[in-house]
Amino acid sequence: MLFSAGGMASALVMPVLVFLFGLVFPLGWIAPPSYEHLHAIVVHPLTRVVLIGLCALSLFHWAHRFKYTLYDGLQVQHLNEMINTFCYGGAIVGTIVAGYVLVRM
């Protein structure tokens, strides 16, 4: 379930964020929001929950996809425990780091 939810969240939200903050604002097609405005949005508790959720879902989507890429693509089924620990442990650690960074703001 985390795989499909993460794929859907990543497919719908991430391209828009990358397009806006990676292309539109730097090229000056529209005026970028001020730091104060973005900070006011990010410090709102609901926005923090959404951002942590987006990070968590995207990381678990990556972990599942990477795990099965290693299984099927590289045929390393004999390293099952290590791959699971690396993939899902990395997703958990990444989610904790994202939560810590967003809470500290």
Image (tube, rainbow, N blue to C red):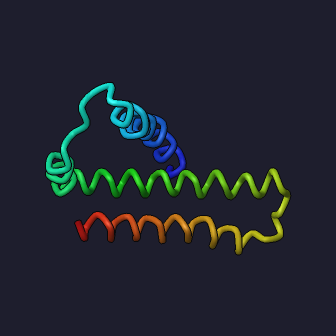
In the image, residue 96 sits, relative to residue 28, either above or below, namely below
Residue 92 position within the rendered picture, expressed as x and y whole percent measured from the top left: 48, 68
Front residue of 79/21: it is 21
Front residue of 102/86: it is 102
Give the residue displayed 37% in from the left and 37% down from the top: 26
In the image, residue 4 sits, relative to residue 42, either above or below, namely above
Give the residue displayed 47% in from the left and 66% down from the top: 94
Q: In which quadrant will I find the C terminus?
A: bottom left
Front residue of 95/4: it is 95
Residue 70 position within the rendered picture, expressed as x and y whole percent measured from the top left: 76, 57
Residue 73 position within the rendered picture, expressed as x and y whole percent measured from the top left: 81, 51
Q: In this view, does 17 lie to the left or right of 69?
A: left
Say how many tags the image has. Answer: 0
Residue 3 position within the rendered picture, expressed as x and y whole percent measured from the top left: 54, 49
Give the residue displayed 23% in from the left and 51% down from the top: 47
Q: Which residue is outermost to the top?
A: 29
Q: In this view, does 39 lie to the left or right of 77?
A: left
Q: In this view, does 70 lie to the left or right of 23?
A: right
| Residue 80, picture quadrant | bottom right
Q: Is residue 2 left or right of residue 77?
A: left
Give the residue displayed 63% in from the left and 70% down from the top: 86
